[in-house]
Image (spheres, grey):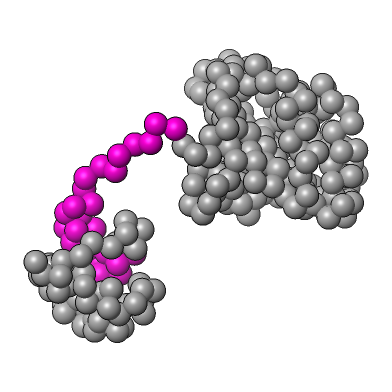
Amino acid sequence: MPNERLRAAMAAGGWTYAAFADKVEVDQKSVERWVNLGRTPRRATAMVAAETLGEDVHALWPVLRQARPARAVSPELVALYDQRADIPVSTFVDMLAQAHEHIDVLVYAAVFLHEAYPRLNDLLRERAADGCAVRVAIGDPDSLNVQQRGTEEKFGHGIESRCRLALMHYRPLAGVSGIEVRTHATTLYNSIYRADDQALVNAHVWGVNAYGAPVWHLRRSGDGGMFDTYASSFDAVWETATPVTEG
């Protein structure tokens, strides 16, 4: 059955099949099938098409209202820990030590790593010397979001002090080739520890310190999965962050 709503929306906007296909980055025959045969594009493509037309995606393709079946377990989930305190620091260290291309750390402080493994900076220097790109983003102690987190976790000004301590730990890495250290002022929904295609993601729960919140261990298995969601989140925060200088 033809999709008359889509046909009308394209006509109202003066879209030809070819021009619309080029805009949405699909084959022209795909657009023809959407209109003339009532075919439904993939959800991501449908969202782009609807936005281009200024239409509601569900008005154009009502079938997309149907919930997709949930998977029992994500194929990217390696392990789930009830709380960060259940994970030996060696798990973090071993994962970082295996990285060859990327190490990304997004936290407010996470001073437990340096406290339990004083050679962390040496490890990061070694990885960088072997060609691994290392990026560390820690919380700006003067930011309102960091201060608010201290209130929410009933940690008071302790979180700000720990951010300053983290800065002291990581500052010697500023200026090291292959390593960048920045401070960020964002609301931290998750702490992220990434090493190549693996990541430990520490969720944050209102009123609970990070060590008491869950952690999931992810291994990337393809484009667009959970791993990529958190990797993209890191990149977005990184763009807002301020470089730490030597001193």
**Does the image show residue 235?**
yes
Q: Quadrant of the N terminus?
A: bottom left
Image check: 169 left or right of 150?
Answer: right
Quarter assignment of residue 10: bottom left
At 21% from the left edge and 45% from the top edge, which residue is drawn? 66
Let me know if residue 80 is in the magenta part: no
Image check: 103 left or right of 58?
Answer: right
Image check: 86 left or right of 122?
Answer: left
At 53% from the left edge and 51% from the top edge, which residue is drawn? 222
Residue 185 rendering spot, x and y as whole percentages? 62, 41
At 83% from the left edge and 55% from the top edge, which residue is drawn? 131
Quarter assignment of residue 142: top right
Task: Look at the image and give the residue range highlighted in magenta.
Answer: 48-73
Q: Quadrant of the C terminus?
A: top right
Q: How many marks?
A: 0
Q: Nearer the viewer, residue 208 or 153?
A: 208
Q: Is residue 152 above or below residue 180?
A: above
**Does the image show residue 142?**
no
Residue 18 rendering spot, x and y as whole percentages? 29, 84
Image check: 143 left or right of 208?
Answer: right
At 55% from the left edge and 25% from the top edge, which residue is drawn? 80
Let me know if residue 62 is in the magenta part: yes
Residue 126 rendering spot, x and y as whole percentages? 89, 44
Residue 15 rendering spot, x and y as whole percentages? 24, 81
Q: Is residue 149 above or below residue 40?
A: above
